[in-house]
Amino acid sequence: MSVMQKKDIRAVVLLTALFISLCVIFDKQLHTAFGFLIGSRFDGLIETSILQHWYNVFAGHSKWDQVGYFYPYSDTLGYNDGYFIYGVIFSIYRLLGADVFLSSEFVNLTLKIIGFISFYYLSHNKLKLGFKASVCGAAIFTLSNALTMQMHHAQLLSIAFAPLMTILIYDYVDALCESSLKKSILKGSLAAVLLSAWLITTYYMAWFYILFFIMFVFCSLPLVFINFRVLKERVKKPSVLAILVPLVVLCVSIIPFLKVYLPKAKETGGQDLFSVTYYAPQIGNLLDPGKHNLLYGDLSDYIFSSYFPDVQRVGELNIGFPWLIALLLIISFFALIFNKNKDLKFSLLKCLVSSLFLSLIVMIKYNDFFLWEYIWRYIPGAKGMRVTSRYALFLIFPLSILAASFLSGYIVRLPKFLMFLIGGILLLEQVNLASSANLDRNSQLSFFKSIPAPPKNCKAFYVIGQRENEFDINNKNIDLSLYPHNVDAMLISEIFALRTINGFSTFNPKDWDFARDPLQSYRARIAHYLTKHEIESGMCELNLQTKLWATIGNVSEVGISQKIKDRIKLSLVSSPSFDENTKKWSVTVSLKNESDLNIGYGTFNVINIGIRLYDSENHLKNVDYLRVDMPYLHANGGENQVKFTLPEDFDKNSSIAILPVEEGINWFDQVGMHPLFVNFK
């Protein structure tokens, strides 16, 4: 077989492995013609809005460091991951005609391809590992059981840049050792630019790479010390420029990241220790491959439900390693530590395994033992991360290198058939059947396409309501209070390149107060924000339920009272009654809604009914004597009744005035409605 034929066969094998890996990962997308995409209704829309922001930046519609949400704050990109590299890839697909959601998914697909190819190149061309082992390692790295369970957090897919970053660092160090000035400047500068771009793209994985690199260097110090004389003889003295130029490039290229994130870190204070500790994994989490793992799912379910029921197996703590690759780490540790082989590659593998164990030790929480606390306290940037367990997701990169090295026979020598069997199991155990493709593309497209363009005089907007018939408005789930209307506003903002005061992010401005609940005060909180920031002029309102825009002339128009005015009719059902048993007076009032809005309980137009108390001389005694919730009244004629039971100390010589009140906005007599007066004499 000729060299060319061998290369062609290898290329086919490599591309086939890549294709199969992608088919496994994007199975649901392929079966639904990309009808369902990676992400959730909430996080998926947040990411897509930031990607669309970069498209707007490249089109000249937006400032690079100012996303559409959290108006009127500036430098708002720093409240979340920046997604810069993602945005570049996204914009290419948008220019090719793909919609916002399909472009977002193609970013994920592209990242997986980058990760696979660059890992193979690192393993085979740089580390000189075997072809089959390198392909297997690339597939392990790409399939990643734990990352599959967390793929709805698409920012974590930036681990794909880890092999590429390592290639550049490898080439840079190699050029330094050879005293190749041009090559060292080029590779070092490229590494600096990539690191800076990675940091402003997705902070977690970039910072984890830096942390692991520091640990690897730390574990390599004994190797350098022991072989100092040999290294001094073999390594040529590098030029000062070879170190200085990449350092200058790093200092310059990292400025955008620092400009955006340092002020926000100071403003927010970063993540607190409680959150960091809460999301720290226990040993059980690291050994749980998840209930959807192809090989171990059922067995894992049985073991953890029967013997370790206290291990939390949901959410961010679904980060377990499949069992064979975990066993491989332990075998490699003993095989390497007790082997006296002084070969450089062998020694570097020792450093790799040591770094992996050190990483696990500092990450694991065992009762009060939690070394990550010291990382959180003393290492710059650590407070920017809340979910400690995500470091386990990053470790698939060094573990994949270890697996490829093992399969190449560098750690232990085993028969070929046994290596083939181990390689097969290592691949299959990384397959996790859990699907993160939960975002209904067609449904999302339909909604956002149905939103009309805002009025031309709008400078910014806020949203009220939520999509019709999507979530129960009375459900008090905190996520349903925080996300639906805010993330819709974020993407609408970017679609129309029009800023919004709404939004929700990793960090929020300190005066952000736009959760849905309590509904009674939502409009009042908006009005307060507009007044505080003096941004009433040019403000618009978008009703997500009716999909109608309205221009706000002044802050009083934020309230529903301005839209209803005197079109709620109040009347007494009967004369006030006195209960001899409870010694209390009661009044029953009939309500009729003649406005064109549904109001009251179960709507976003929540109004209370208030009572003012007057003394026997008709002097106002208590302006806010009693309040009750207004029942549901449908638009254009809806009727209902409400009964007031007055306090026991109520004096029958007093009188009351009944009228609707909008919390934090005004009483309805301020918009022309006449109160219903009731006498008890």
Image (cartoon, rainbow, N blue to C red):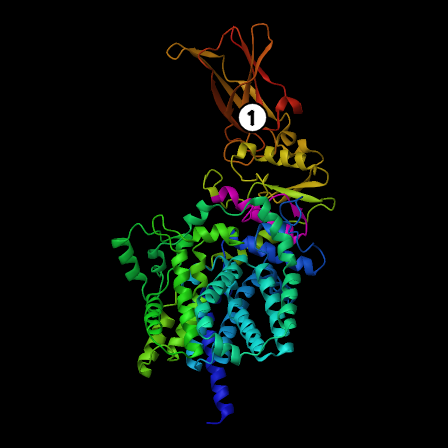
Relative vertical location of residue 360 with respect to residue 136 in this rendering, above or below: above
Label 1 secondary element: strand
Pinpoint residue 364: horizontal percent, then vertical percent: 38, 55
- The residue to which callout 1 is attached is 592
Q: Residues within 10 Å of mark 1 (few under 14, many from 20)?
A: some
The residue that appears at 65% across and 58% down in the rendered structure is: 255
User: Which residue is more in the foreground, 93 or 590?
Assistant: 93
**Which residues lie in the magenta part?**
479-507
Q: Residue furthest right?
A: 457
Q: Residue furthest bottom?
A: 1
Q: Residue furthest left?
A: 306
Relative vertical location of residue 665 with respect to residue 212 in this rendering, above or below: above
Left-right relation of 349 to 238:
left
Residue 468 picture quarter: top right
Residue 550 picture quarter: top right
The residue that appears at 48% across and 11% down in the rendered structure is: 650
